[in-house]
Amino acid sequence: MTQRNTETALPYALKRVGVLMNADPTDPLEAEGVLNPATAWGPDGELYLFPRMVATGNVSRIGRARVVIEDGVPVGVERQGVVLSPDEGFERGAHNAGVEDPRITFVPDLGVHVMTYVAYGPLGPRPALAVSTDTISWRRLGPLHFTYQSHLSTDLNFFPNKDLVFFPEIVPGPDGRASFAMLHRPMWDLDWLRPGEGAPAPAGVADGRPSIWIAYVDAEAARRDLSALTSLRHSAPVAAPEMPFEVAKIGAGPPPLRVPEGWLLIHHGVTGPVARGFELSHGAVYRAGGMLLDPDNPARVLARSQEPWLSPETREETVGTLGNVVFPTAVERIAGTVYVFYGMADSAIGVAALERTAD
C-alpha cells in the first residue's frame, strides 16, 4: 500500500441537510426500508435517485425516483417504480435474493451510465454490473471477474466483494495504459461459508481487515465492447483502516469526485463488531470520512480525514434496521453545491452538503 503524503491538506466537510426519502409503509417492496442509493441525471435534465428497496425477508430491488429540487436543494422524491430486480440466477440463492447498494457513474468517454451493484446470490455478495443510456432501462453485463495475479497467490473471485464504484474519467493504469478504474472492497473471511476455512488474505496483505482496493479496465477494450468493463486486472490495495472511526473496516462511497487537489473519495468507516456472512453488524457504528487520491496514480492516498465528517446523530441515523449508520453512496452537483446522498440506519435516505473549509 502506497504511503500517503501527510502534508497534503483535506479541506472538506459534510453538513447535514435532511431526510430525502423514507420507506412507504403501504408498499410491500419497501417493508424493510429504502437505503444506500445511487443517482444519475436523465436525458430530460432531471436528477434521479436509485434507492435500494428492501422487501420482507431482506429481498432487495433497485428503484428509480425523480429527485424534487427546490431552490437548488434536494427535498424529496417522486417514485417511478423498479429498474432492477433479482431475476437472474446469480442474484438469487435457495433462501435469499437481492440486487443491492448500487453506485452509478456516468462515463462520458463511453456515453453510458455504469451501475455497479451487489448480487446477493448462492455464494453471498458478489459484484455485478449493468449499463444504461437513459437511466430507465438497464442492461446487465453480468458478474465482475478479476484476472488472476500470481503475486497475490489467490483468486480474488473466491471472495465476497462490496462497495464497488467506477471513476468517471480515464486514469493512468499501472501498466501505463489509459484505463477505467474501479474501487472495490474484498472480504477475506470464508469461515461463514465453509467453517474452518478462516480468512486467507492474499500474499503480501498483512492487514486482513476489509479495505479499499482498486482494479483497472483497458479503456480501448471497453470502447470496443462494453462487456470488457466486467474484466478487471491489476487489482491492488489502496487504503486499510487507519483512523479511530474506521478501525473495523472501511469501504468506498460515491464515485470519486475530481477536485483541485486530486480525486476526492468519500468513504465509510466502521467501529464495533463486524458480523460474518449475511448477518447485520448490530452494535457497529458507520461514519463518513474522506480521502484524497493522486490523479496520476489513484492507488496512492495523498491525505485522509483524521476525524469523521458525518456521524449518526439524528433519530433517522440512529434508529432503524441497523442503527447508528450513515453510509454515503452518491454525489451530485446541483446549482453550484455538491450534495452527498447517504443511507440512514439501513432504513431511510439522507442528504448532506459537501463544503470546502479552507483554500
Image (cartoon, rainbow, N blue to C red):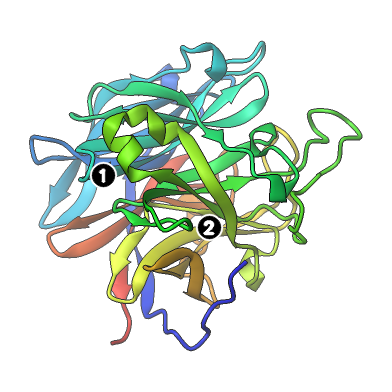
Which amino acid, by three-letter code, is at mark 1?
Val
User: On the picture, is 2 further left or further right than 222?
Assistant: right
Residue found 51% across the figure and 82% down from its top: 5
Q: Quarter of the image for the N terminus: give it.
A: bottom right
User: On the picture, is 94 further left or further right than 119?
Assistant: right
Residue found 16% across the figure and 36% down from its top: 42
User: On the picture, is 162 further left or further right than 83?
Assistant: right
**Pair 1/2: label in front:** 1
The picture quadrant where one finds residue 148 is top right
Residue found 60% across the figure and 31% down from its top: 125
Residue 17: x and y, percent?
A: 31, 60
Question: Which of the two residues, 312 or 206, is positioned nearer the viewer here?
Answer: 206
Residue 306: x and y, percent?
A: 55, 78
Which element is circle 2 on?
Answer: strand
Which amino acid, by three-letter code, is at mark 2?
His
Residue found 51% across the figure and 31% down from its top: 144
Q: Is residue 45 above or below residue 225?
A: below
Q: Is any atom of residue 21 visible in this view?
A: no
Q: CA distance from mark 1 to mark 2?
A: 23 Å
Of labels 1 and 2, earlier in sequence is 1
Which residue ends up furthest to the right in the rendered image?
Answer: 196
Question: Which of the two residues, 123 or 352, is positioned nearer the viewer here?
Answer: 123
Q: Quarter of the image for the C terminus: give it.
A: bottom left
Is mark 1 in CB contact (under 8 Å) with mark 2? Answer: no
Residue 277: x and y, percent?
A: 72, 34
Residue with the mark numbered 2: 268
Label 1: few (<14), some (14–19) or many (≥20) C-alpha neighbours in 10 Å = some
Q: Is residue 158 above or below residue 233?
A: above
Which element is circle 1 on?
Answer: strand
Residue 263: x and y, percent?
A: 37, 66
Residue with the mark numbered 1: 107
